[in-house]
Image (tube, rainbow, N blue to C red):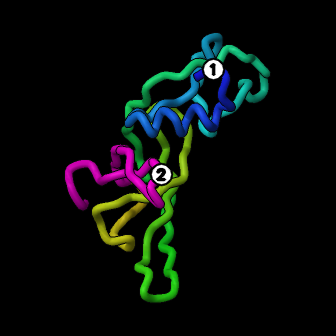
Amino acid sequence: MSDMHPEQEYFAHLAQGRFMLQRSRSSGRFYFHPRVAEPVTGARDLEWVAASGRGTVYATTVVRPKPPQKPYNVVLVDLEEGPRVMCRVEGIEPEAVHIGMEVRSRIGSQDDMPILVFDVVGGAA
């Protein structure tokens, strides 16, 4: 996949059912959004590694579109590896998502495209 732009590689991994993050070989730091070089240092030694999928809700809001669309949440999740990602938590009412909630990632689908979503660890808390 090395001929692809990093964002294309990220979505190709999702399409294969894998949530992957980039990590700098020299610093060991993980990054999200996909990029071609490490921020600050400019190191280009980034590699793709499997993410644990574990995280904690850092912030949440509920989006209330016009009916008949249903409300949904938009969350910021701090991943165990360090990066923060924006996504949504599924399988729970949008208003029930709260800061500090433990979540686990999975590959979902929207408009026939793979997307990263999260589920609550241990059910609704």
Tell me, yes or no, whether the two marked residues, 1 and 2, touch with CB atoms within 8 Å: no
Which residue is situated farthest in the bottom direction here? 67
Quick check: 16 above or below 91? above
- Tell me what residue is drawn at x 49 percent, y 44 percent: 78
**Residue type, numbered disc 2:** Met
Q: Residue furthest left?
A: 122
Q: Where is residue 100 in the image (x, y as percent from the top left)?
A: 40, 53
Q: Position of residue 36 (x, y in %)?
A: 72, 27
Asked which secondary structure carries label 2, the reply is: strand
Instruction: Say left or right for 42 vs 56.
Output: right
Q: Report the magenta residues as a range.
A: 101-125
Q: How many marks?
A: 2
Quadrant location of the N terminus? top right
Q: Name the residue under label 1.
A: 2
Residue drawn at the location 38% of the way across and 71% of the way down: 94
Image position of 28 (left or right of 119): right
Q: How crowded is mark 1: few (under 14 residues within 10 Å), some or many (20 or more)?
A: few
Label annotation for residue 102: none
**Residues packed near mark 2 inside 10 Å, few (<14), some (14 to 19) or many (20 plus):** few
Of 14 and 24, which appears nearest the observer?
A: 14
The disc, 1 or 2, on the residue closer to the chain's N-terminal end is 1
Residue 79 image position (x, y, % from top left): 46, 39
Q: Could you tell me which residue is drawn at 51 percent across and 82 percent down?
A: 65
**Which residue is depicted at the point 48% across and 33% down?**
13
